[in-house]
Image (cartoon, rainbow, N blue to C red):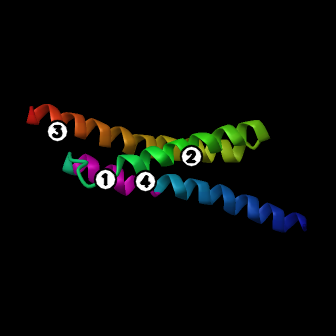
């Protein structure tokens, strides 16, 4: 493959990993503002976290720092969503009891 094409694909891949992490921000903002996680799937976001953790490990073992860094960003933002889901559900159940 031509050098500039490979560089372009690598650059686009890095940008897409950053965008992937940013895409979790609206969910974080919604959870934070509403202080309620009733309509958000813990299984979905927990599954996303597991997949991203596996991608981080894969990137690490392949020596791909872009993959590791990008998925660590996604793991952080998705992990924050997952944390907020659990936090607000625990808080809700504690207040109901």
For the residues bearing labels 2 and 4, Cβ distance under 8 angstroms: no
Q: Secondary structure at mark 3?
A: helix
Inspect the magenta stretch and tell me whether residue 77 lies in it. no
Instruction: Pick whichever, 43 or 22, lies toward us.
Output: 43
Measuring 21% from the left and 47% from the top, which residue is drawn there?
A: 36
Q: Secondary structure at mark 2?
A: helix
Instruction: Quote the CA–CA distance across marks 3 and 4.
Output: 23 Å
> What is the x, y in percent for residue 85?
31, 43
For the residues bearing labels 3 and 4, Cβ distance under 8 angstroms: no
> What is the x, y in percent for residue 18?
57, 54
Which of marks 4 and 2 precedes in the sequence?
4
Measuring 26% from the left and 46% from the top, which residue is drawn there?
A: 32
Which of marks 4 and 3 precedes in the sequence?
4
Which of marks 4 and 1 precedes in the sequence?
4
Report which residue position mark 4 lands on: 24
Instruction: Quote the CA–CA distance across marks 2 and 4.
Output: 15 Å
- The label shown at residue 51 is 2
Instruction: Quote the CA–CA distance across marks 1 and 4.
Output: 12 Å
Tell me which segment is drawn in magenta.
Answer: 23-33
Instruction: Quote the CA–CA distance across marks 1 and 3.
Output: 14 Å
- The label shown at residue 92 is 3
- Snapshot quadrant of residue 84: top left
Query: What number of labels is visible?
Result: 4
Report which residue position mark 1 lands on: 40
Assign the C terminus to one quadrant of the image: top left
Measuring 52% from the left and 47% from the top, which residue is drawn there?
A: 74
Instruction: Mark 1: give few (<14), some (14-19) or many (20+) Cα within 10 Å.
Output: some
Which of marks 3 and 1 precedes in the sequence?
1
Q: Nearer the viewer, mark 3 or mark 4?
A: 3
| Side of 70 where 89 appears, left or right | left
């Amino acid at each position: 493959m031509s050098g500039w094409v490979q560089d372009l694909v690598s650059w686009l891949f890095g940008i897409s990993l950053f965008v992937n992490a940013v895409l979790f921000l609206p969910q974080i903002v919604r959870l934070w503002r509403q202080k309620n996680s009733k309509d958000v799937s813990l299984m979905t976001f927990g599954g996303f976290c597991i997949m991203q953790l596996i991608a981080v490990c894969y990137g690490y073992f392949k020596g791909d720092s872009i993959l590791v860094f990008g998925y660590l960003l996604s793991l952080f933002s998705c992990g924050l969503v997952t944390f907020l889901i659990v936090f607000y559900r625990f808080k809700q159940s504690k207040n109901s009891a």
